[in-house]
């Protein structure tokens, strides 16, 4: 998977992208992240990338020229890949959106800064707009890194364990079950007996039930869209009867 990132702050990316799992994925050629400084495409001698908004008002607006030049000259006319603007006005990022994006061989990410971007970037250059949540950051750089991280770990070979992403919270439509590791007892708190029983069928059943219980308690909104078996529904009904939520 290739990522082309267009930003005014390329220096903020390497500390994160050159660590741990993403660094290993880069070394193994599974992902290629290319950082492009939009300022390099500003045509005037001071490399200006922002200007005052027409109509007045506070803040500065990211100019269309340098962004168009950066994206068009990097991607070329035939790229055909999604060009995604990171903005609080975009569709909200989720595990589902990450999976959808992971199916593309190449993604271009445009990081907004200042008060916003010239509307012509939205109308005539980008093909998609993504928000990482209903809050406003100072720029699209952190959102771009979040998107790269969430998409990359879905690509075959990026996580050491081939099934690694399959049980993740949200991948199944539910929150994930609790995890424990050694020691079996810590400060008097024991690992649930079932997990050390060696009985795989029982462990699977416990994990599924914990997943349902957690989702019911913490994110009941997710249950409406989660694929649930008859057994799951029976278990949820039992939970609701024993512990009414309202
Ligand atoms: N830029 C500023 N805030 C943002 C957000 N919540 N999501 C994506 N890009 C942003």
Image (cartoon, helix red, strand yellow):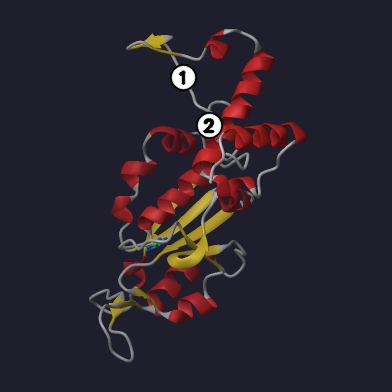
What residue do we see at 54% from left, 29% from top? 177
Q: Nearer the viewer, residue 29 or 203?
A: 203
The residue to which callout 1 is attached is 180
Q: Secondary structure at mark 1?
A: loop
Extreme bottom residue here? 55
Mark-to-mark CA distance, 2 and 1: 20 Å
Q: Residues within 10 Å of mark 1 (few under 14, many from 20)?
A: few
The residue to which callout 2 is attached is 159
What residue do we see at 60% from left, 63% from top? 79
Q: Nearer the viewer, residue 178 or 59?
A: 178
Instruction: Residue 200 in the image: state x and y as whole percent.
Output: 66, 14
Kindly report which numbered mark, 2 or 1, lies closer to the viewer in this rendering: 1
Q: Is residue 113 visible?
A: yes
92, above or below 161, in the image: below
Q: Residues within 10 Å of mark 2 (few under 14, many from 20)?
A: some
What residue do we see at 27% from left, 74% from top? 47
Q: Secondary structure at mark 2?
A: loop
13, above or below 153, in the image: below
Q: Which mark is residue 168?
A: none
Mark 2 residue's CB less than 8 Å from ligand 1: no
Going from N to C along the chain, the mark reached first, 2 or 1, is 2
Horizontally, residue 16 falls left or right of residue 59, namely right
Quarter residue 66 falls in: bottom left
Q: Quadrant of ligand 1?
A: bottom left
Report the label total: 2
Q: Are marks 2 and 1 in contact (CB under 8 Å)?
A: no
Extreme right residue here? 230
93, above or below 90, in the image: above
What residue do we see at 30% from left, 63% from top? 138
Instruction: Residue 202 in the image: state x and y as whole percent.
Output: 66, 16
Horizontally, residue 146 falls left or right of residue 224, namely left
Q: Nearer the viewer, residue 205 or 4?
A: 205
């Amino acid at each position: 998977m290739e990522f082309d990132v267009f930003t005014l702050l390329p220096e903020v990316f390497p500390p994160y992208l050159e660590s741990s799992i993403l660094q290993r994925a880069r070394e193994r050629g599974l992902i290629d992240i290319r950082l492009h400084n939009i300022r390099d495409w500003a045509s005037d001698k001071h490399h200006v990338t922002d200007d005052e908004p027409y109509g007045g008002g506070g803040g500065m607006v990211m100019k269309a020229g340098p962004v168009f030049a950066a994206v068009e000259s990097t991607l070329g006319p035939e790229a055909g890949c999604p060009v995604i603007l990171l903005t609080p006005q975009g569709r909200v990022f989720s595990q589902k959106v990450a999976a959808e994006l992971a199916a593309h061989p190449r993604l271009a990410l445009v990081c907004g800064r200042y008060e916003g971007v010239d509307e012509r970037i939205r109308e005539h250059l980008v093909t998609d707009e993504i928000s990482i949540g209903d809050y406003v950051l100072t720029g699209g750089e952190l959102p771009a890194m979040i998107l790269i991280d969430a998409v990359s770990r879905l690509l075959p070979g990026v996580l050491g364990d081939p099934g690694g992403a399959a049980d993740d919270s949200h991948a199944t439509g539910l929150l994930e079950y609790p995890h424990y590791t050694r020691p079996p007892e810590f400060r008097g708190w024991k690992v649930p007996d079932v997990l050390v029983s060696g009985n795989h069928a029982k462990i699977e059943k416990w994990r599924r039930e914990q997943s349902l219980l957690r989702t019911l308690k913490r994110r009941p909104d997710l249950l409406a869209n989660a694929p649930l078996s008859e057994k799951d529904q029976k278990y949820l009904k039992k939970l609701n009867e024993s512990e009414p939520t309202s």
